[in-house]
Image (cartoon, rainbow, N blue to C red):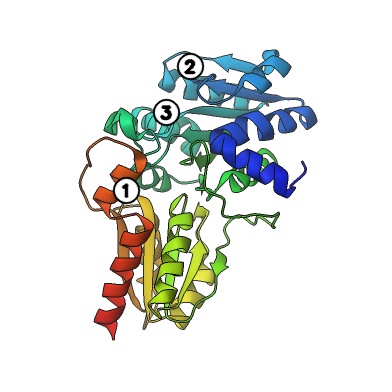
Amino acid sequence: MKYTAANIKMWARMGQRGAVFGVALPEIAARQDRVKLLTADLALLSGMERYTKKYPDQFLNLGIAEQNMIGVAAGLAMDGYRVFASTYASFIAVRSLEQVRQNLAHMRCDVKLIGSSAGTAAAKSGISHWATEDLAFIRALPNLTVFSPADSLEAIKATEWAADMEGPVYIRLSGGLSCPIVYEEDYAFEPGRLIRRKEGSDVAVIATGLMVSESLKAAAILEERRISCSVYNMHTLKPIDREGLAEIFSRYGLVVTVEEHMISGGLGSAVAEYKATLPNTPRQVFLGFQDAFCEAGTQRYVWEQAELTDVQIADRIAREWERKA
């Protein structure tokens, strides 16, 4: 895999799904003999054509039967295959939760679940296709590693890492075509480790998925208001980086978590759960969907309703910083 600037830009145009299924999976299948890719009738929408043409015998379309797909994936894994299974994130975390719990979490079957159109990527399709609770459901299950990549490059790196480890994994893909670029050049992807993307002195912003890009833009706006923000990318929701979080809590007087997810059970909850075990920690502000469904529309229109655009994030942080002062 060549992590050149040109490739990174191309992968961003392809979106996270296109990068994973059109770039990462064919590379993985080329070096691993017993790879299987399963989908629930989303091959064309997910950009799987390159893989299916090159490895037709290592691909199965289970049709619109997501629960059955999880069962088949678990059976193949028990027979020694390295299985990747993908459909809409909402259909993995909600419709197929029992199968994920029983077959993957409990039985520890070696299946890598790739939830596409996570968050509100399928914005115009409405809440049936949104995944704004998936982290809460999946994170509660034992034995699962949970990734939420910030851009297409990170989606490829998370997939490559998953291919080389044993055990079930959930990879949450929220970036569509022309996915914002957070990493313009290659970097060392380390599961379970926070990555600081911007250094600041006043506020620590911890974000995941597409909200990393929005938070970086918000931090640039706040610099003009003389509020200095560090921005951290939490690409691994389980296990969380306790050491990294402890350092953040010791350095900053205000911590803000930003996620394209309900504030219950997601990134903010994961941070707060650990923070509650430590003495003398800073105040935390939760930015995400506030226990409500939004109206369908473009993804940015949905974000505006939830106050998750860069300008809105900056305004909220400024208000909270003034309150602290």
Find numbered disc 3 in the image and state the secondary structure of the residue it sits on: helix
User: Which of 268/240 is in front?
Assistant: 268
User: Disc 1 versus disc 3: distance between alpha carbons?
Assistant: 31 Å
Secondary structure beneath disc 1? helix
Amino acid type for the residue under numbered disc 2:
Asp
Location of the N terminus (image quadrant): top right
**Residue in view at x 64 percent, y 44 percent:** 9
Task: Give the residue number, with chain letter if any, for mark 2.
Answer: 41
How far across and down, in percent of the image, does residue 210 sit? 46, 50
Displayed quadrant of residue 296: top left
Q: Which amino acid is tagged 1?
A: Trp
**Mark 1 crowd level (few <14, some 14–19, many ≥20, 10 Å Cα):** many
Q: Quadrant of residue 218?
A: bottom left
Q: Residue 267 placed where, x, y %?
A: 40, 56
Of the two numbered discs 2 and 3 in the rendering, the one whose residue sits closer to the viewer: 2
Residue 161 appears anywhere in the view: no
Q: Considering the image in quadrants, where does the C terminus appear?
A: bottom left
SS state under label 2: loop
The residue sitting at the front extreme is: 224
For marks 1 and 3, the one nearer the N-term is 3
Nearer the N terminus, badge 2 or badge 1?
2
82 with respect to 297 (left or right): right
Q: In the rendered view, tell whether residue 158 sits above or below residue 249.
A: above
The image quadrant that residue 120 belongs to is top left
Whether pointer 2 and pointer 3 mark residues with C-beta atoms closer than 8 Å, the reply is: no
Please tell me whether residue 251 is drawn above or below residue 140 in the rendered image. Answer: below
* Eye-nearest disc, 1 or 3: 1
Q: Nearer the viewer, residue 254 or 215?
A: 215
- Name the residue that disc number 1 marks: 303
